[in-house]
Image (cartoon, grey):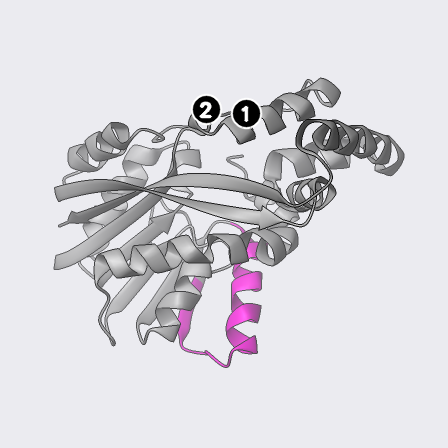
């Protein structure tokens, strides 16, 4: 999960399937920061640019970095489709941001810092490039063990794919953890809130299709297994999901932590 090549592989599926789902959390983050038209915004580990795109629509001057070349390519394609050409998009490392001290009015990072090998360096870099009166907003998934439906989904998947690493206790899943690491990096007035949203999929098969195209750990296992073995495994997983949840629409809840901090 720490290798850019992993995210290169999932970028098209992530942009098509996951980015639209996470768009609502990007809007929550922008509202929390009280973004003003014309402000300088940096999106760290932007992925396909979900937050960067929303910030540009709101009139911000947007810069965005990701260590995955393919994610940056997806971002640029999305901006071009909407006619939003004003963006500084770079392939870069979050632990060594290519910007001057205090360059931005607002810095965001959504669902990425919890996956980084050196979070301490990334937090310090975000703090460094944030202006004196700037705001930083960091989003992380809350503990998945609090979501019974998600626990059941993982149990079904593990019966067929026992070697698949579906870590339900990622770093920064607790608000106190996120508060502590941002405070240690020098941020002031750190406040963390939890937001829960529900998403509906047409069927268990549709839910699994999204996960198998866009979930990084699942994509790696799919590629290692090959088409025939993967098709058989997917059929077994869908049968298990339908036995547990039925064949109708599936409602999944996701809970995230959003931290707002000052310089």
Q: Residue at (17%, 58%) from the top-left corner?
A: 102
Label 2 sits on residue: 145
Please tell me whether residue 188 is drawn above or below residue 101 in the rendered image. above
* Whether residue 165 is visible: no
Quick one: 186 or 59, which is closer to the camera? 59
Relative horizontal placement of residue 222, taking residue 138 as reference (left or right): right
Q: Residue at (41%, 47%) from the top-left corner?
A: 93
Q: Residue at (23%, 40%) from the top-left corner?
A: 192
Image marks 1 and 2: residues in contact by CB distance under 8 Å: yes
Q: Position of residue 231 (x, y in %)?
A: 84, 36
- Neighbor class of circle 1 (other Cα within 10 Å; few <14, some 14-19, many 20+) is few
Which range of residues does the magenta coloring cover? 68-89
Q: Residue at (46%, 79%) from the top-left corner?
A: 85
User: Could you give the CA–CA distance between mark 1 and mark 2, rounded to whole angstroms?
Assistant: 6 Å
Magenta run includes residue 88: yes
Q: Position of residue 243 (x, y in %)?
A: 74, 27
Q: Quadrant of the N terminus?
A: top right
Magenta run includes residue 212: no
Relative horizontal placement of residue 5, taking residue 98 as reference (left or right): right
Label 1 sits on residue: 151
Residue 249: give its label.
none
Please tell me whether residue 121 is drawn above or below residue 37 in the rendered image. above
* Whether residue 7 is visible: yes
Quick one: 233 or 163, which is closer to the camera? 233
Which of the 4 quarters of the picture holds residue 78?
A: bottom right
Please tell me whether residue 49 is drawn above or below residue 241 in the rendered image. below
């Amino acid at each position: 999960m720490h290798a850019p090549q992993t995210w290169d592989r999932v970028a098209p599926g992530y942009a098509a399937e996951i980015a639209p789902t996470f768009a609502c959390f990007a809007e929550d983050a922008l509202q929390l920061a009280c973004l003003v038209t014309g402000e300088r915004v940096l999106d760290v580990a932007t992925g396909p640019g979900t937050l960067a795109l929303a910030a540009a629509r709101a009139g911000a001057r947007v810069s965005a970095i990701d260590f995955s070349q393919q994610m940056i390519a997806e971002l640029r394609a999305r901006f071009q489709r909407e006619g939003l050409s004003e963006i500084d998009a770079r392939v870069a490392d979050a632990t060594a941001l290519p910007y001057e001290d205090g360059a931005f009015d607002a810095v965001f990072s959504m669902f990425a810092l919890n996956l980084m090998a050196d979070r301490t360096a990334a937090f310090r870099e975000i703090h460094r490039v944030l202006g004196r009166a700037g705001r930083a907003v960091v989003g992380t998934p809350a503990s998945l063990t609090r979501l019974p439906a998600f626990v059941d989904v993982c149990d079904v998947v593990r019966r067929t794919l026992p070697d698949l690493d579906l870590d339900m206790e990622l770093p920064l899943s607790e608000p106190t953890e996120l508060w502590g690491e941002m405070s240690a990096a020098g941020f002031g007035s750190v406040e963390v809130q939890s937001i829960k949203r529900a998403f509906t999929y047409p069927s268990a098969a549709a839910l699994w299709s999204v996960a198998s195209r866009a979930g990084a750990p699942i994509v790696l296992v799919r590629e290692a297994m090959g088409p025939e073995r993967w098709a058989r495994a997917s059929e077994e997983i869908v049968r298990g999901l339908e036995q547990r949840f039925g064949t109708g629409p599936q409602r999944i809840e996701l809970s995230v932590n959003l931290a707002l901090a000052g310089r």
